[in-house]
Image (cartoon, grey):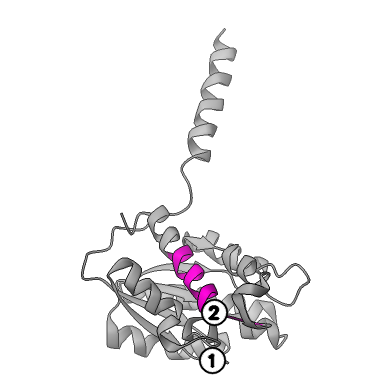
Amino acid sequence: MKLAALRATAVFLLAVLAGCGGPSLDPLPADATVLAFGDSLTYGTGAPRDAAYPVVLARLTGLTVINAGVPGEVSAAGRERLPELLEEHRPDLVLLVHGGNDTLRKLPPGETRSNLHAMVEAGRSAGAQVAMLGVPGRSFTLSAPAFYEEVAEELVVPIDSGTLPGLLRDRSLKSDPVHLNAAGYRRLAEAVQALLVEAGALP
């Protein structure tokens, strides 16, 4: 009987843990500043400027969201650029959507992983929380490379590694082979909002 009880307890605990979801974030204050940091997918290439996902996210949440996207930027350059923006804006949250150009240019995955890791740590060192999105690489499945999940797991960062690959598989949501259109960026903003709600940053 004791063994059966122990087994039942173990099954219960596993079920509870399975339902706990991913890493959590502290609730954001109403006057929070969010730094949306990335490349062309953050900038909004392929759509009007007011359709970029950071602009849409600001409308959805009422938060101040700074569009810090630079088209064509690789992660090494982003790693160098981020500290100055953190000092300038003192964000409460950094949304990291970076690394896609590394895979397009076939840069070593280990370098991209290291740069993403450093950017998460830079955000946290500046007092910001961090959330990530995985960006698909060069593959027929358009899946995000494994290093996104690896960095997120190692540093306990909320991540959505499925939304961007899914959006970029849908031709109706794209302006060209690697960028979204206005409808696609709205879907991206909605997914980011959902990630933040799930993690506890938003109600």
Give residue 69's position: percent from left, percent from top. Answer: 46, 86
| Residue 19 visible somewhere in the drawing | yes
Q: Residue at x 38, y 79 (%)?
A: 55
- In which quadrant of the rendered image does the C terminus lie? bottom left
Secondary structure state at the residue bearing disc 1: loop
Reading the image, the residue beneath label 1 is 71
Rendered position, 4 above or below 82: above
Side of 137 where 78 appears, left or right: left
Q: Nearer the viewer, mark 1 or mark 2?
A: 1
Give residue 76's position: percent from left, percent from top. Answer: 55, 88
Q: Which residues are magenta?
A: 178-192
| Residue 24 visible somewhere in the drawing | no
Amino acid type, mark 2: His
Secondary structure state at the residue bearing disc 2: loop
What secondary structure is the magenta-colored segment mainly?
A: helix
Instruction: Residue lying at the far right in this picture: please name it.
Output: 140
Q: Residue at x 53, y 81 (%)?
A: 41
Side of 169 where 4 appears, left or right: left
Reading the image, the residue beneath label 2 is 98
Give residue 179's position: percent from left, percent from top. Answer: 60, 82
Rendered position, 25 above or below 15: below
